[in-house]
Image (spheres, rainbow, N blue to C red):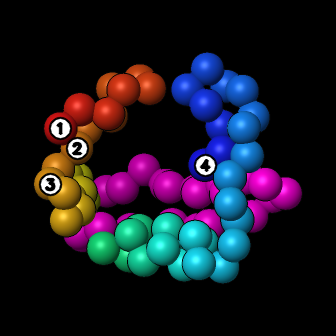
Amino acid sequence: MGISDTGEVKGIDTSNRICSKTQDTLNKLEPKLKTTVEVKKNLIVINVPEGEEKPYGSSRGFFIRIGQTLKR
């Protein structure tokens, strides 16, 4: 988080509040998926491994990523 769709580094608020909110959102994925969140300067890096129990859902429904596009 903190990088635009065109690849430009914009930065983001990396406070504990934002990091906690991000982790809370990731923890709501069903089925559970082991993700990690790292802060690097003014970026939040979320590592998401490819899951083996597809599809994964969130409180907003199910999504599929095709390239850089997220489809609902």
Disc 3 to disc 1: CB gap under 8 Å: yes
Relative depth, front residue between 18 and 47: 18
The residue shown at (32%, 33%) is 70
Distance between the Cα atoms at labels 1 and 4? 20 Å
Which span is picked out in magenta?
29-52
Distance between the Cα atoms at labels 3 and 2? 7 Å
Q: Residues within 10 Å of mark 3 (few under 14, many from 20)?
A: few
> Is 32 a magenta residue?
yes
Please, what secondary structure does the residue beneath circle 4 have?
A: loop
Label 2 vs 4, first from the N-terminus: 4
Disc 3 to disc 4: CB gap under 8 Å: no
Per the image, the residue denoted by label 1 is 72
Distance between the Cα atoms at labels 3 and 1? 8 Å
Per the image, the residue denoted by label 2 is 63
| Residue type marked 2 | Phe
Report whether residue 14 is seen: yes
